[in-house]
Amino acid sequence: MINSNIIILGCNSSLPTRNFHPTSQILYMRENYFLIDCGEGTQVQLIKAKIKINKIDNIFISHLHGDHYFGLIGILSTYQLLGRKKKLNIFSPKGLKNIINEHLKWSKSKITYPLKFIILSSKKSEKIYDKNNVNIYTIPLKHKIYTNGFLFKEKKKLKNLNIENVNKIKEIKISDYINIKKGKDYIKKNGTKIPNKYLTFKQQKPLSYAFCSDTSYYPKISKYLKNVDLLYHESTFLHKDNILAYKRGHSTSIEAAKIAKLSNVKKLLLGHFSCRFPNIKKFEKEAKKIFNNTIATKSLNNYNL
Ligand SMILES: [Zn+2]
């Protein structure tokens, strides 16, 4: 894989069915494999998606409803069986560490690789990761229990030199390259400015991905989602069930589309579908009335940022 993209492992709500799986996805960004939520069966979905689980070093759990983390103990056990040595970070609300430790205690099992829980408790957005060319922030959501979405932002890359043009300016030294790669113009000794765009190639702008699950319609989050390249927003119900959605702390397809429009995102992915609606195209059709660039996700499909 070269470009950032999202691989959906599961996009159904709590009841699993033959073709649908609970929430889990892999974000591939700048050579990182981030696992986002880990519903039951995530390991098997990873195998089907041909993703080696040992590539994952960071797991993000949005909240502690079972359909978002029941697959975790399985993955942690598999790492143990495979003799994992690398550190694994788990970002999650308070309580998950106790749940995992309780499992381990009663099965007289041990985890011998370094396992670090980063406990999230703030009700405000915070930066939780700043490494490997990516920044990650929480997005506080409005659900039945404490829940975060996550915003992943690529850092700006250094520009590639147009070496043919650089060589034409004899006085440019290798030690000047770093500033040119950072986007600075070159000022010659006689004061002439050589514009950066002459010395470098045009660069793709850093991409961003936002994951929002589970949440009621919550327009306040749009300030975190402004102009993101790809937004995944839950859409548990069709809009005819908007009152039920509100009562259960979920959103409808129309509400997800309203958030996408309000936030001026480029593309919207819908997911977390209730199994009462087997035809997921209905979600897409409904959302497109408000926000045209919408896709109802399917398990094991990839979507580019
Ligand atoms: Zn939930």
Image (cartoon, helix red, strand yellow):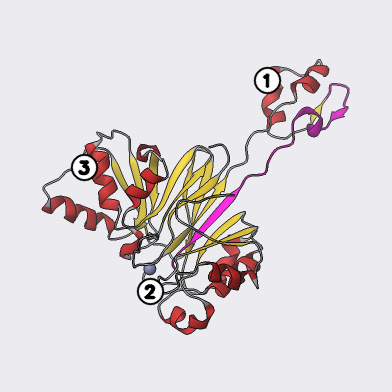
| Label 2 CB sits under 8 Å from any ligand 1 atom | yes
Mark nearer the viewer, 2 or 1: 2
The Cα atoms of the two marked residues, 3 and 1, are separated by 47 Å
Task: Name the residue located 35 percent from the left edge and 51 percent from the top edge.
Answer: 42
Q: Secondary structure at mark 1?
A: helix
Q: Quadrant of ligand 1?
A: bottom left
Return the residue at label 3: 111
Picture coordinates of residue 29, whole percent (x, y): 52, 43
Q: Is residue 175 visible?
A: yes
The kind of residue on which mark 3 rests is: Ile
Q: Secondary structure at mark 3?
A: loop
The kind of residue on which mark 1 rests is: Ser
Picture coordinates of residue 162, whole percent (x, y): 75, 25
Q: Is residue 154 above or below residue 165?
A: below
Q: Is residue 88 magenta?
A: no
Mark nearer the viewer, 3 or 1: 3
Q: In the figure, is residue 208 to the left or right of 93? A: right
Picture coordinates of residue 291, whole percent (x, y): 65, 68
Q: Which mark is residue 175?
A: 1
Q: Secondary structure at mark 2?
A: loop
Could you classify mark 3 by the number of other residues whose Cα lies within 10 Å: few (under 14), some (14-19), or many (20 or more)? Answer: some
The kind of residue on which mark 2 rests is: Lys
Question: First in sequence: mark 2 or mark 1?
Answer: 2
Question: First in sequence: mark 2 or mark 3?
Answer: 3
Return the residue at label 2: 144
Q: Are marks 2 and 3 in contact (CB under 8 Å)?
A: no
> Furthest-top residue in view?
170
* Magenta highlight range: 188-214
Which quarter of the figure has residue 284? bottom right
Q: In the figure, is residue 116 to the left or right of 204? A: left
Q: Is residue 64 visible?
A: no
